């Protein structure tokens, strides 16, 4: 699988199966990527601004052995990112 496909994949892949977590008006979708028997921290942060849904792809270098631990760490890192960046992440 090429890097482009790994990063973006199919537009249909995982977008409806993941249950989001709300944090300060943002919806966080943890979507860890399987990689070499481990899971890379990845997901999306979304928010409605001026009637339009904005989306930020969130991918980190961290690799963890379990999918659930990767989801949990993604949520923690997303909270910190939201606290630091706010709506500027979409700019």
Image (spheres, grey):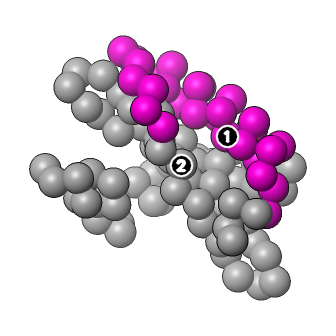
* Residue 76 inside the magenta-drawn segment: yes
Which residue was labeled with disc 1? Answer: 78
C-alpha gap between disc 1 and disc 2: 8 Å
Indicate left or right for 91 with 61 as reference. Answer: right
Indicate left or right for 83 with 62 as reference. Answer: right
Residue ranking furthest to the bottom: 51
Marks 1/2 in contact by CB < 8 Å: the verdict is yes
Residue ranking furthest to the right: 24
Which residue was labeled with disc 2? Answer: 58
* Residue 63 inside the magenta-drawn segment: yes
Q: Main secondary structure of the magenta part?
A: helix
Indicate left or right for 58 with 20 as reference. Answer: left
Q: Identify the element where label 1 is drawn.
A: helix
Residue 49 to residue 31: above or below? below
Inspect this view and state whether residue 67 appears: no
Q: Quadrant of residue 75?
A: top right
For the magenta stretch, what is the residue range?
A: 60-87
Residue 15: give x, y in percent of width and height.
45, 59
- Residue at 34% from the left image edge and 61% from the top image edge: 8
Residue 75 to residue 26: above or below? above
Q: Quadrant of residue 66?
A: top left
| Residue 23 - label | none
Mark closer to the chain start, 1 or 2: 2
- Residue at 81% from the left image edge and 83% from the top image edge: 50
Q: In this orientation, which residue lies closer to the viewer: 38 or 4?
A: 4
Q: On the rendered image, what quadrant is the C terminus found in?
A: bottom right
Residue 16: give x, y in percent of width and height.
47, 59
- Residue at 75% from the left image edge and 72% from the top image edge: 48
Residue 89: give x, y in percent of width and height.
69, 60
Q: Quadrant of residue 54?
A: bottom right
- Residue at 33% from the left image edge and 54% from the top image edge: 7
């Amino acid at each position: 699988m090429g890097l482009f496909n790994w990063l973006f994949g199919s537009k249909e892949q995982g977008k409806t199966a993941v249950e989001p977590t709300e944090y300060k008006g943002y919806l966080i979708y943890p979507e860890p990527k399987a990689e070499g028997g481990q899971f890379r921290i990845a997901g999306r942060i979304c928010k409605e601004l001026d009637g339009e849904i904005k989306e930020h792809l969130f991918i980190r270098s961290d690799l963890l052995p379990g999918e659930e631990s990767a989801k949990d760490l993604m949520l923690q890192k997303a909270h910190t990112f939201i606290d630091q960046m706010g709506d500027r992440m979409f700019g």
